[in-house]
Every structure is written in structure tokens, then in C-alpha cells.
Image (tube, rainbow, N blue to C red):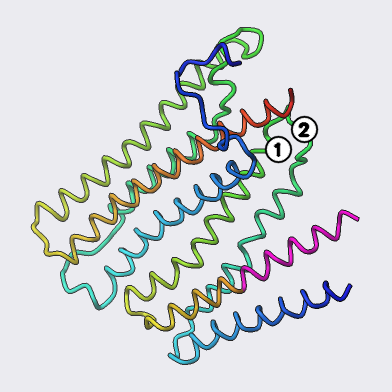
Amino acid sequence: MTAGLKTIISLSFVLAIGFLLVILSCALFHQYLPLLVVATYVLAPLPNFICSRCASPDDFVESSGNAVIDFGRFCTGFLVLMGVALPAVLAHSHIIQFPAMVMSIIGGLLIYGTIISFGMFFQEEQEF
Amino acid sequence: MSEERLWKFRRPEWMNSATARSAGVYGSGALFSLAFFILLDAAVWSKSALNGSTVHINFTDWLPLIFSSLGMLIINSIEKTRLSADSFSYSGSGVAWKARVVLFLGFASLAGGMAGGVTVLVLKYIVTETSWPTTWMGIANVVANAGVMASTVVLWISQNMEDEYSYNLSL
């Protein structure tokens, strides 16, 4: 139980650092477009969750269930790379500065890593 | 299944695992995203102050990517098992034939998108002899279409992998 508590505390710490980096990358340069990265990474695991609920992974006869899962994975892959590509696009056109790009990418990856770790954590809990 | 194999080299064992399959699907989504954002980057750059030339990206530059994506959608929506099923009992009358026609349309759209990308690059950027940073907008078009093509290939391979995997599991 203490191990679970430690995990929660460290994960929330990482999440706070991620948000700090993203907000800093916006506020330091007075350009608030990198906040979109947060929205992307929050949306990223959603298709996966939704599609895994829609399809029952048990039946192997009907492959439409697998197609739905694959579609969810495709969307998740799209959104994850979008979180990296969006600051790069903005920085290439000099809409945001280069340090802001680096900070928002690192912060976004930290946020996404936290969400994924939480998902795995709770899935493990569900089995009992 | 093994007697019906067509090719001499068999697929490596690690490719049949479930992790490789899902990694393929994720990677396919990432490749598609990369292709889309390369062209979006060119479009944003074209409207920004960095673009000194009078050449801008408009709808004609997006058209090849739209066709490529349409082809990708068609190709990967086809049920793969109907494609190889020649037996009458399983596929019914002419389902495999219909699937092949639709698949041909999908591949034609994909190849048309690629050809369209090259056409835009040549007609809009090379013939008019634009200088380097402007030419990148045309090259980005070709790169984006190649990315959609690569994404299609990866998704196709990982979906075929899925069939093998479920077959092994059901045995």
C-alpha cells in the first residue's frame, strides 16, 4: 500500500513538473499557443480507452473488434506524434522561440508519461 | 497453412507477436501524423514572415495529400480475409472480385496522390526556378505523400500480422 502511495505522489510530482514546463514555455515568451500540447496529450489516450471498451477482445472469429482497437491505436499514435510535431511546426515558423519548443515538448512528454503510468496502474488494480 | 505458402522465406518469428503488431499500428499512426504535419509546417511557413517569395501554399498543394489519405482509408478498410478467399463457400459469389476492384481504386488513389505531389513539385517549384527555402514547400509535399504511403504499408503489414497471430492462437 505504501508503494502505491509513493507511486501516486511521484507521478503527481512529475505531472506538476510537466505542467510547469509547458506553462513556463508559454508565459516566458508571452505566446500561449504551446498550451495546445497539453490538450493533445490529454486527448491522446482517449481513443485507445474508448475503442478498447467498444470491442470485446475475446472473440477471434469476428475481426471487426480488432479493427476498432487498431483504429484507436492509430488515433493514439497520431495524437502522440502531434504533441511533438506541433511545437516543432510553431518554432519553424518563428511563432514561438526555440527554447519554448524544447520546454513544451519535454513538458508534454512528462504529462503523457504520467497519464500512461496512471492507466497501467489502475488496470493492474482492476484485476483483483 | 504452411503448405500453401507462396514465398521461400518465411516471416521472422518475432513479427508474429502481439506487441510487434500493436507497435506497428502505433507507428503507422505516428507516420501518418508526421506526413500531415510536414505539409502543415510548409503551409504555416508559407504564410509566415520568413517566406520572402510570392509563392504560397494553396489548395492545389493539399490535393495530393487528400488523395493519398483517401487511398489509405480505402485500402485499410478492406477486409483482408475476403481478398484471398477464392473458395465459393466462404466468400460467396464474387466478393473477392469486388474487394480487388475496390482495392485497386485505393491503390490508384494512393499512387495518384504520390504522382500529384511530384507534379506540384515540378510544375510549381522547379519549372518556375524558385530558390531554396521556397523549394522546400514542394519537397515537403512529396515527403508527406511518401509518408502516407509508408504509413499504409506499415498498417497493412501489421494487419496481416494480426491474422497470423489470431490463427496461431486459435489452433
Pointer 2 residue: A59
Looking at the rendered structure, the secondary structure element under dot 2 is: loop
x 33%, y 48%: residue:
B63
Residue A87 to residue A46: above or below: below
Q: Residue at x 60, y 80 (%)?
A: A18
Q: Residue at x 24, y 55 (%)?
A: B139
Which mark lies nearer to you, 1 or 2? 2
Instruction: List the residue tagged with mark 1.
Output: A65
Q: Chain of mark 1?
A: A
Q: Amino acid at mark 2?
A: Asp
The answer to whether residue A120 is above or below residue B104 is below
Q: Chain of mark 2?
A: A
Tag of residue A85: none
Q: Quadrant of residue A86?
A: bottom left
Specify few, some or many for label 2: CA neighbours under 10 Å numbering under 14, 14-19, or 20 or more.
Answer: few
* Badge 1 or badge 2: first in the primary sequence: 2
| Labels 1 and 2 touching (C-beta < 8 A) | yes
Q: Which residues are magenta?
A: A111-128
x and y, in percent, of residue B50 in the image: 23, 76
Answer above or below: position of A123 versus A107.
above
Mark 1 vs mark 2, CA separation in Å? 8 Å
